[in-house]
Amino acid sequence: MPAATHYPLFARRDLDGFFGLFIDNIVQLLLILALCGAHCGMAPDSELMLLRILPGAALSILLGNVFYAWQARRLAQRTGRNDVTALPYGINTPSLIVFVFFVMLPTYSKAIQAGDSPDTAARLAWQMGLIACLGSGLIELLGSFVAERIRRHTPRAALLSTLAGIAIGFISMTFALQIYHRPLIAMLPFAVILLSLFARHRFPGGLPGGLIAVVLGTLCAWSLPHVLPASLAGPPMQASAISEATATWGVYLPVLCIDEIWELLSRPNEWGVYLSVIVPMGLFNVIGSLQNIESASASGDEFDTGSSLAVNGVGTIVAALFGSCFPTTIYIGHPGWKELGSRAGYSTLNGLVIAAICLTGTVTLINAVVPLEAGISIVLWIGVIITAQAFRSTPPEHAPAVALGFFPAIAAWGATVVVGAITTVWFANHMSGATIESLLSGNADIEVNGFLLNGLIVLERGYIFTCLVLAAIAACLVDRKLMQAASWSAVAAILAFTGLTHAYQVSGNTVDYLFAAQEPVSEVFQRGTGIGIGYLLFTIIFVAAAKTTKTEPSREA
């Protein structure tokens, strides 16, 4: 193949892509500060945060971003193209939240209840987070050896519909709510993004729309509260927060944490109980990254699956070895970055800037200066593009299969909102309000305005797998590949019977997986078995139909 005639280190539209990816990564860093501080005893200016977690995150983010930028350049050189876009990469949001609430928080709480000091409990929670991160990385690395085979035998509709469902709920809907929650700060940047990306309008001087949106949103946040009532403009930005944030400035280099990991690894009775969280999240990350690679392929950038997933796993392992509890991943949204006109430079720049922020303690300063609402419209655009691609890049007759795959991901978003709301009310009532466990124990069929709480949680458990198999079954049926539909149904049954999907258990407001090997609990929560039987009936019906129906030409994708 001829070498690419011109593939720049940094293209002009890389700046737009950088702002989108940078904002996404900054959100994760701010989540780490907030959640670890509130639930695990790790203040933003604590030794664990500044000297361990943030430097470890910096190294893992830099490693992945630089590799995927290099990978894009290699593909451009090999194919003679100059429009290759690097895979986006950063901290894995679902793993971040799950590891904090289902690994680190329980560890911290148990240690406090056992009489340990808050500092000792925080350190133990951090160590347990390292074990979870390391386990997830190892699963991702091992998954890289078989993922390409999975990809070749999975309908594109199944892979892309899962991403679109996640994009609708966890990206587009979440950020749309934030825009309309603080309209005077967020809607002007939103208008700029719509003008720039939908109308492809060019601004004076060739300035990128993302940069203009962030600047205008920041100006609104700092000026409007001084001239408008707080009920309209929201709370004002605080100048004092800037001086307080600069107190954390310094140089914090990554430090190997092998001794701390080994110290806890030698006590398997302590970390073994969290395998029910670590294993599913590792598997979900493999499938999610595979779907994102398929999304890139649908956009025209055919990256090697094995090496892409392997480096993804290595990045997570590096994070754990150098003190970060939070896995990294190939991000959802490659089509969006490509639509922006980004190439490889946005990835390299993101890695360098995020690393510098983490290694110097600058995260709190950014939070004090730039409101989140100033840049979330860029990320909202990414979610819209992903959803559109799921339909554009699959055969028109597979559109129903794509739509069917949305439902588990939407249920996951709904369950997150419902569980969060109930938990908030529970704490607001001084821990005396009804819990999820009490609601379901009293009536598993509880329904509020058409929403079945049990059904919502059942569909949410393992939703990445469920999105995949439902869309795959539907796509195979559209193509009249009945035996393949039966095979996917059998896979769905196995996932349900083992507890990787649909089965759950509740303690208070904590919803956890229920695996077949675990001790049995109240039958209210053992819904996975019944659904597994339902999938077996799918299998039987499809096999019977295949054996009794005259063979017809299939509609190939």
Image (cartoon, helix red, strand yellow):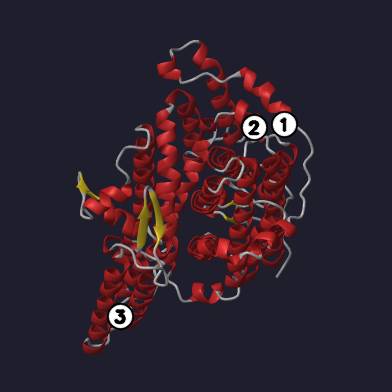
Indicate left or right for 11 with 115 as reference. right
Q: From the viewer's perspective, is the residue at label 2 or at label 1 nearer?
A: 1
Q: Position of residue 200 (x, y in %)?
A: 52, 40
Q: From the viewer's perspective, is the residue at label 3 or at label 1 nearer?
A: 1
- Which quadrant would the N terminus be assigned to in this image? bottom right
Instruction: Give the numbered dot on residue 317.
Output: none
- Which quadrant would the C terminus be assigned to in this image? bottom left
Q: Which residue is mark 2?
A: 364
- What's under tag 2, amino acid-wise? Thr
Asked whether residue 68 appears in the rendered view, the answer is no
Q: Are marks 2 and 1 in contact (CB under 8 Å)?
A: yes
As helix, strand or loop, the secondary structure at mark 3 comes to helix
Q: Which residue is mark 3?
A: 482
Q: Which residue is mark 1?
A: 248
Placement of 497 over or under 125, stated as above or below: below
**Distance of mark 3 from mark 1, alpha carbons?**
61 Å
As helix, strand or loop, the secondary structure at mark 1 comes to helix
Q: Quadrant of residue 18?
A: top right
Q: Are marks 3 and 1 in contact (CB under 8 Å)?
A: no
Q: Nearer the viewer, residue 468 or 557?
A: 468
**Distance of mark 2 from mark 1, alpha carbons?**
8 Å
Labels 2 and 1: the sequence-earlier one: 1
Labels 2 and 3: the sequence-earlier one: 2
As helix, strand or loop, the secondary structure at mark 2 comes to helix
Q: Position of residue 321 (x, y in %)?
A: 71, 58
Q: Position of residue 370 (x, y in %)?
A: 59, 28
- What's under tag 3, amino acid-wise? Leu
Q: What residue do we see at 70% from left, 50% from top?
A: 56
Dot 2, crowdedness within 10 Å: few (<14), some or many (≥20)?
Answer: many
